[in-house]
Image (tube, rainbow, N blue to C red):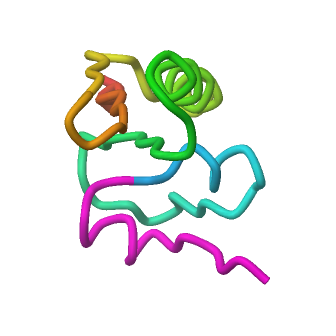
Amino acid sequence: MVRAETAEMIAGSRLVTAQALFEGRADLNGYPFQLLGVVSQRGTGMENVSAVLAGAEMLLPYGWELVNVSEFTSSEHACAVMRRRVSG
């Protein structure tokens, strides 16, 4: 069984995997920071970019907005940088 990604674990690296978001294994309740990275290493090239964009889109209804997306070809992963909207 694949374990959940808790807010404490996610806060330690400031990263959540797109796969955990897809599978409902990511718990961001209590995540203390305003910035978050959604990462994918499961595919290659555009598959990873597509995965992090889909993961980022899942967070939009919860007050997060997309800041940037980067693909790191040397390590074959992608990251979507998210910012929690500040209400006020």
- What residue span does the magenta drawing correspond to? 1-15
Magenta span includes 19:
no
> Number of callouts in the render?
0
Q: Camera-side residue: 74 or 4?
A: 74
Q: Quadrant of the C terminus?
A: top left
Judge left or right: residue 84 versus residue 60. left
Tell me the quarter of the picture where residue 85 sits: top left
Asked if 37 appears above or below 53 in the picture, the reply is below
Does the magenta-highlighted stretch encompass residue 5? yes
Q: Is residue 10 left or right of residue 58?
A: left
Residue 60 in percent (x, y) is at 56, 22
Q: Position of residue 19 (x, y in %)?
A: 64, 49
Which residue is located at x 24 percent, y 40 percent? 35
Picture coordinates of residue 26, whole percent (x, y): 61, 60
Is the residue 83 above or below the residue 25 in the image?
above
User: Residue 8, percent across and down?
Assistant: 38, 77
Quarter of the image for the N terminus: give it: bottom right
Residue in view at x 40 percent, y 19 percent: 65
* Vertical side of 87 occupied by 1: above or below: below
Q: Residue at x 31, y 43 (%)?
A: 36
Position of residue 37 in the picture relative to residue 46 (left or right): left
Q: Is residue 66 above or below residue 44?
A: above
Taking the spot 39% from the left edge, 75% from the top edge, the residue there is 9
